[in-house]
Every structure is written in structure tokens, then in C-alpha cells.
Amino acid sequence: MRYVSTRGEDLGSGFREILLGGLMGDGGLAMPVRYPQLSLADLQAMQQMNYRELAFAVLRLFVDDMPEGELQRLIEKTYTAEVYSNGRVAGEAEAIAPVRELEAGVWLLELSNGPTLAFKDMAMQLLGNMFEWALEQNGETLNILGATSGDTGSSAEYAMRGKRGIRVFMLSPHGKMSAFQTAQMFSLLDENIHNLAVRGVFDDCQDIVKAVSNDLEFKSRYRIGTVNSINWARVVAQVVYYFKGYFAVAQEVGATVSFAVPSGNFGNICAGHIAKMMGLPIHRLILATNENDVLDEFFRTGVYRPRVTAETRQTSSPSMDISKASNFERFVYDLLGRDAGLVRELWKQVDTQGFFDLRGTAEWEGIGQFGFVSGVSTHCNRLDTIRLVWERYGLVVDPHTADGLKVGMEFREEGVPLVCLETALPAKFEETIQEALGRAPERPLQYAGIEDAPKRSVVVDADVEVVKDYIRLNAE
Ligand SMILES: *Cc1c(COP(=O)(O)O)cnc(C)c1O
């Protein structure tokens, strides 16, 4: 498979070349030159597959520059009951990404059984194994630099810990993550994991990462890479669980199913869009946002108006507090019939006037074929949903999943199974569960007492030079 940029560049790159990269040279995002198409017969052949077999069947369509045996080996190493058990489904490899029926026609797709209790582990664990393999092949090493407000950083660290040829330098705002998230990250004592607690806020961390990445000399000398959400391999690895969810609930192969997705950077739901483009019979992709509703506004009105950072609100679903969804450009590229010139033009408009407006265009008129609908939740809605789900189904869900359930239910349709994606376990967000239910959520065994475990981190000033010095001293 060849990859092109949403802004028009065609480097003829294969999967391995874009695996370790972020933005393309022209500022766009990598996309496969076309989507592999699956027929009804192809889908029927996949119906009985377990997660590993599905992952291989889907990923091999996008990866043709890695020996198939190698891809299979990495998939088998990644998707094991040991990695994705979390105490809930121990011992059953077939139960990776299981569905749970909440009531007739409504399902929860459990994606948070990985090491850090969030769906990001589904793709990030595979990414860690792919990175290790690719670096070894090329005889290279990599220093991953990232900024996190919680979920991404821990997911990346748990995926990269102990990997040969990889070091991780993760910046987080000092004293601003939840106690659980802090403990989860800082209790990793692996030699190749470096936690830098920055005296500042998340944006300071992100600014430092950008400044270091823009220093091309430093970047190439210290082989700096990223694992952010625009990484194509992360997106494509997420396509797999839409197939898993579909086959688990579809009345018959060919019947349609809808998915509700709590969204921030548009990475998770972008994978659903790709699954649909490949021919998986998805009826609706229900996009749920919190009070940061840029994407909901677009799907309701046709106007895309990303907010400036200062307008981003801090909510009880913090992993969705995003004002500029980095993967959204991938969908817009498809919406515009893959016209890269038009994508460039629209993003120029965002830079100069702060928005673009598709109302009245043929593209906007045709958006229905993509199946997207959207809605929002407020803090109150999420608390209500957490209570309702507990009372009705005896299940505690986290505030992000609650957001998806709330919006998903609004778009529920008779005769179409609805799959709501679980994006984190409630244990990660104790404060909100306490507020909703008056008690703390259960915590998986491996995290019992984690706040008291030995920890390793360094506190640094929000200063690019300080971070660079630290990397110089500790780089691989
Ligand atoms: C990252 C995250 C999201 C948002 O996913 P995107 O791919 O950025 O849209 C939602 N919920 C949780 C718990 C997350 O960690």
C-alpha cells in the first residue's frame, strides 16, 4: 500500500516509512492511496475470527512492506489475554474487546482492558512492538518525546517500557494530573522511561515538544520521534475493533450496526470511518463531544471553527478537552473527494480567518453518505448517565464512556444494534464517580495501592533548553 498526504504530497512511501513519522513534509497527514474493499464474502469469512485473526486480516491490507509472518508475530505478541485481561476476562484470548449487552439492542464494546485502563492501549501496544521491530531492522534507535495530560502518556509509556532501542521522554504538567494518573506513570521504574514533570500547564508541555521538534538539527541528531494521535499506525490498528464489535452484534453479516464514539482528537471515530469506507456495514457513526463541541458544531452546521487553546474548557471528561482535533483533516480529505488542493485551501482559511464553512457546497450536501451524526454532553448529563447506567445495568462507567452512551441513546434506531465504545475504566476518574455515585469505583488488582509504590520523575522548569539538556544527557 502506498501512502499520500492529505495536502497532496505523494512520496510513494510504504507503511514502514510512515510508521515512525508524524506530519508529512507538507503539513498534511498520511492516508492510504485507496481503501481496500471487502465484499460480503470477505466479511463472511471474517465472521468467526478472534481478535488476533481479525487484526491480521485487516492490517495486512494496509501493510505490504513487512513480511506477513513478521506482522503476524507482532500481532500475536500484542493481543494476548495477559496484556488485555485486567482481571475481568482473564484467560480468554477470544475475549479481547468483548461486548456486553446493556439492554436489547444496546451494547458496550469493552476497549479498556489494557495495561492503562483506556482504549488507547488497543493500538499503542501494537505500535510499541512495531517500533521495536522496525528500529531493529533499520539498525536505528528512537527517542520519543511527548506531552500528556494523562491518558496518552501512560498508554505510550506502558507500550514502550523495556523496548530495545527506544527511550521515552514524557512531559506532564507538575501536580495537575489526577493522583491515579500520576501514580500510574511515575511508578514505572524502567530505565528507558523518563517522566518530566514541568512546572506549568499542559500547553507549556506541548509548546516545549513543538519547539524541540522544530529544531531540526537537534531533532535529527537525537532522533526525536512522536507517538501522537496522528500516527497512522495507531489509527489503522483501531479499525480492527470496529470489525470485532460488528461481528459480535450484527444479526447477520451484511446487516447494519451503529457505533457511538466519545471523541476528542477524532482518532477513534476516524478508525470507524475507515472501517465503513472498507465496506463494513456501519449505519451511523455517532460522534459524542463534551462541552468542547467544535466537532459537534461542524457535523450539525457545516462550519468548522477550532477554538484557541484559551477557550478550551476543563471538564470531567478531560481526554476529550480538545479544541483542534488533529485527525479531523483525514475525514475532510475523504469528504472533499480526496481533493488535496481544496484541503490546503480550507486549512489556509482556518489560519487566516479562523474557520471554514462548507454550507451550500456539493460536498456538504453529500455528507449523509458518510453516516456521521453528533451530539454533546454536559457535566450534569454525564453524572446522570453514570447513575442511570449503574441503576439500570449494575455497571459503573467512566465519564467519557458516559458521554458516548448519552449521545448514542439519542440516536438509537429501532432494528439497528447500537454499539457504544468504552474508552476508559472508571478507576481512572475516581473523583467524578465519587460525585455521581457517592463512592469510589472498583480498581483492578494490579493498581491496588499504586499511590504508595516507589516513583521516579524529575521536576523541571517550563524551559525548552532545560528539556533539551535533559535529553542530551539521557538520550539513547
Ligand atoms: C483519548 C481518549 C478519548 C478521545 O479519543 P480520540 O481518538 O482522541 O477522539 C476519549 N476517551 C478517553 C478515555 C480517551 O483516553
Image: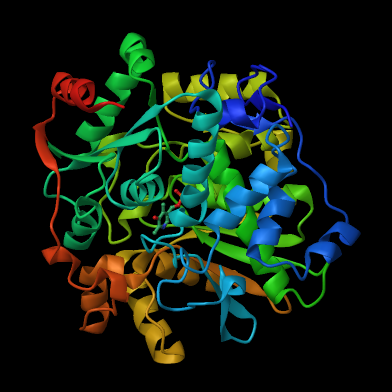
- Quadrant in the picture for the N terminus: top right
Position of residue 384 relative to residue 187, above or below, is below
Residue pictured at 53% horizontal, 55% vertical: 78
Give the image location of residue 402, x and y in percent.
Answer: 41, 70
Left/right placement of residue 269 relative to residue 417 reads left
- Most foreground residue, 167 or 264: 167
Query: Can residue 289 be seen?
Result: yes
How far across and down, in percent of the image, does residue 67 sit? 71, 38
Q: Report x, y in % for residue 124.
A: 47, 48
Q: Please report the residue visible at 79 percent of the width from the left and 63 percent of the height from the top.
A: 46
Picture coordinates of residue 230, whole percent (x, y): 49, 36
Residue 143 in the image: above or below residue 341:
below
Q: Residue at x 74, y 73 (%)?
A: 250
Image quarter in which the C terminus is found = top left
Which quarter of the picture shows residue 307?
top left
Closer to the camera, 262 or 108?
A: 108
Residue lying farthest to the top in this orientation? 217
Count of residue discs: 0
